[in-house]
Amino acid sequence: MSGIKDRVAIVGIGQTAFGKGLEDTELSLACQAISMALDDCGIAPSEVDGTASFTMELNREVDIARNVGFGDVTFFSQVGYGGGAGCGTILHAAMAVATGQCNVAVAWRARKRASKASRPWAQTPQRIDDQWQWSRPFGLGRPVDEVAMLMRRYMHQYGGTRDHLANVALAFRKHANRNPNATMYDRPLTREQYMEARWISEPLCLFDNCLETDGALATVLVSADRAKDLPQKPAFVHSAAQGLPPQHQTMINYFNDDPLLGPSWAAADQLWRESDFKPADVKCAQIYDAFSPLIPLSLEGYGFCERGEGAEFTNDGALEWPDGRLPTNTAGGGMSEAYVHGFNLVLEGVRQMRGTSTSQVENADTCLVTSGEGVPTSALLLRN
Amino acid sequence: MATEAKFLLPDLESEDAAPFWAGTARGELLVQACGACGRWRFPPRPMCPYCRSVETKWEAASGNATIWSYVVPHPPLLPAYAELAPYNVIVVALDDDPKIRMVGNLLASPEGAINEIDPASIVIGEPVRVVFQQIDDVAIPRWVRK
Ligand SMILES: [Zn+2]
């Protein structure tokens, strides 16, 4: 047995509406998304025997299982580090199916911004005894501040500009404007609006930030053999990896030798090593975008360009459907579709493999999906 | 109507960091060093990642550094910080070992507030030196231009 390459597929997807202040509880949203994903592939809930989600997910397996009606669950896993976890849940589920620890695995994420876990930075105790004592007392309090610090350094070191970040924000907004499920479906964004937007943490403005979204999304994974008999075109897990580089400090990664070399690089090494595709073969990508600077950093980490060229890469509509070199976040991403800790990127990757995206990339035979840069991360290469 | 806005502060009893904060209270910027191989590391932790020794000592840095990067936060922020916004936060690289970086703020004077420097004047690479500001029972290391 060698690896998981193409041995497991995502065969079912489900998602609730996205919004702010949704009435349903987080548990209800999670159960509804999982239920829809099971209906999507025609698998009975009693067959589900594996689960994977985020350590930050507030809905426990026991509660999901007794609501949706799972059978004996023999594998349950949680992946850490917030937005770094999304593709990792798919990796864990795929490994469990490939090794026979379970047969039908569900991976999901449900989140309400009103819930306690939504804005962890606002819950910092006044006396800090962990890693945050080295940053938060100084007013570096939010993830946006932490990422802005890296972006300012990137601008100094490599010459990235706000125009490059606007390229990112505008591309994803255009894709959202084609996706009726996207939060920003009917809200176009111009470069002028971007440039005039209020600051959040200079050099980042409002439109460099992801949305805050209530919603839930779920996937169902089974073996490639089983996938053949199911109604939907399978999205095979071609390669997947987690990444935690040496001397990394989550979110405040200023203390290692080379802070602009983020976890993407570690995940990418493993991802491409196991893959038949190279970056040049990839025609579309879903890249974790809690903040716009994560796009140039990830483009470099995953090998779409050289170091320091990620900002330049975004020029000439490179991220835009249909003609860009690498149409990215084709449903709008975290910045314009919904921010559900990046799990919506996984589902858009699956839709690209099915041929059902609202910004469908022609002849897309593989799609890269990534999770958070700047935190211990994970990535996924799907193929059809 | 002023609510009492509170700054976030380190827990001075933090297991690995207590000597650092005891140092700032005496006006010293201490860096944890390996008791075996001597290399510096920051933030402090129990084991040396270079030689795996758990012997540690603390050595005084010169207090000279250069600005490595900076940001200027705007609201929404916790109340104590929102009152001062926009202000600067910098990361400095110590002259003694530029791989040792610390988060801080750039002040116009040792007693100044974190919002007194024009952010447009901040230059990556400019030299700074440490000062200590007392907030409650904590001496917070911040930085002024040299
Ligand atoms: Zn050592």
Image (tube, grey):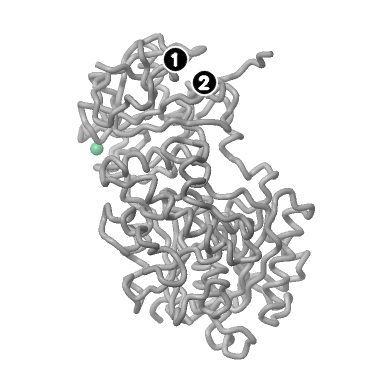
Instruction: Write down the chain letter for disc 1.
Output: B
A224 w.r.t. A195: above or below:
below
Query: On the image, which quarter does residue A108 sit in?
Result: bottom right
Query: On the image, which quarter does residue B44 sit in?
Result: top left
Q: Identify which residue is drawn at 54% across, 88% down.
A: A225
Answer with left or right where residue A173 lies relative to residue A32. Answer: left
- Residue B25 spot, x, y in % from top left: 39, 12
- Label 1 CA crowd tier, 10 Å (few <14, some 14–19, many 20+): some
B36 w.r.t. A316: above or below:
above
* Screen quadrant of the N terminus of chain A: bottom left
Answer with left or right where residue A204 lies relative to residue B63. Answer: right
- Residue A171 spot, x, y in % from top left: 47, 59
Give amino acid for label 1: Ala
Residue indicated by mark 1: B113
Q: Is mark 1 within 8 Å of ligand 1?
A: no
Residue indicated by mark 2: B84
Q: Identify which residue is drawn at 33% across, 38% down.
A: A255
Q: Are marks 1 and 2 in contact (CB under 8 Å)?
A: yes
Disc 2 element: loop
Of all residues, the one furthest to the bottom in this rendering is: A229
User: Distance of mark 1 from mark 2, alpha carbons?
Assistant: 8 Å
Ligand 1 is found in the corner quadrant, namely top left
